[in-house]
Amino acid sequence: MFSAYAYLSAYDRHKKLINDYLLLKGETVTSLKRDTSRDKRDYDVIKENHKFLWDEDEDQPSTWEARLAKKYYDKLFKEYCICDLTYYKYNKVALRWRTEKEVIVGKGQFECGNKKCTLKEDLRSWEVNFGYIEHGEKKNALITLRLCPECSMKLNYRSQKREVKRNKALKRLGSHPKSDIEKPSTSDDTSNNTRIKENEDLSTAENVDNTVDEELKVEKSNIWKEKPVESIERSREEEFEEYLADLFM
């Protein structure tokens, strides 16, 4: 080590070396500053590589930037969207998926999905064919919005959207408030008809009653020969699906 540096602290030695270098090269301190024009934050990387919808089979991220954007996408909740209706009169609606914090507080499901609205009463579900341009390519996605009456009017200002109702969601799962199994026609209907005609023609009613009795005997004798009807009780998975369909409305 040079004798001029022997008795200096590490910081003072660093400053002297820098000053000697600048004096030798004839430059200033600004020449030592790093070029930050190409620096990017995580937000900038995600913004450049973001996709509204990723195809699990086709969209395989090949760079670390794409993998970062895909990891952010996987953390989003894609049952409902959050919208910005600022330019609704121009038929321009901005949409994005919900974050974990918004899911916890119920924003977009139990609270109006407009980011500037906080109403929680009389919410309605709407299916929107969202058209957007992504990386120079035009795409479409069918999404669901939960909006209050006022925001629903803004959404439908230019074109009427399709409203999603509870019965429709239950029908998709193969369930319906009414029983799906058709009731077989029994002799009760025939007996009721004969009772209506009893005042008109008593003799005809007696003949029909006799026929009904014979049919009942045949049915009772064949009831043990028929295959048992499958139970209409739902499995746990079907009950969960129906519950979630009712919840995500």
Image (cartoon, rainbow, N blue to C red):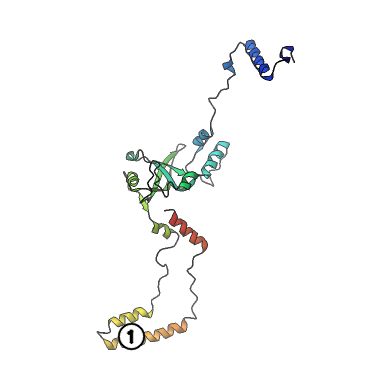
Q: For the N terminus, give its image quadrant.
A: top right
- In the image, 9 versus 163, the foreground residue is 9
Task: Give the answer, above or below, for where 153 lies relative to 177.
Answer: above
User: Looking at the picture, how far across and down is residue 153, in whole percent?
Assistant: 32, 46
Q: Position of residue 37 (x, y in %)?
A: 53, 25
Which residue sits at x=31%, y=80%? 193
Q: Is residue 218 above or below residue 167?
A: below
Looking at the rendered structure, the secondary structure element under dot 1 is: helix
The answer to whether any part of residue 201 appears in the image is yes
Residue 69 position, x and y percent, is: 53, 39
The total number of labels drawn is 1
The answer to whether any part of residue 53 appears in the image is: no
Task: Tell me the residue that label 1 is attached to.
Answer: 208
Within 10 Å of disc 1 (Cα), the crowding (few <14, some 14-19, many 20+) is some
Residue placed at 33% from the left, 44% from the top? Answer: 154
Q: Looking at the image, which residue is at 44% across and 55% down? A: 247
**218 with respect to 9 (left or right):** left
Q: Amino acid at mark 1?
A: Val
State the image quarter where residue 60 is shown: top right
12 horizontally vs 156: left or right: right
Task: Judge whether 202 appears above or below 62 on screen.
Answer: below
The quadrant holding residue 168 is: bottom left
Taking the spot 41% from the left edge, 84% from the top edge, the residue there is 216
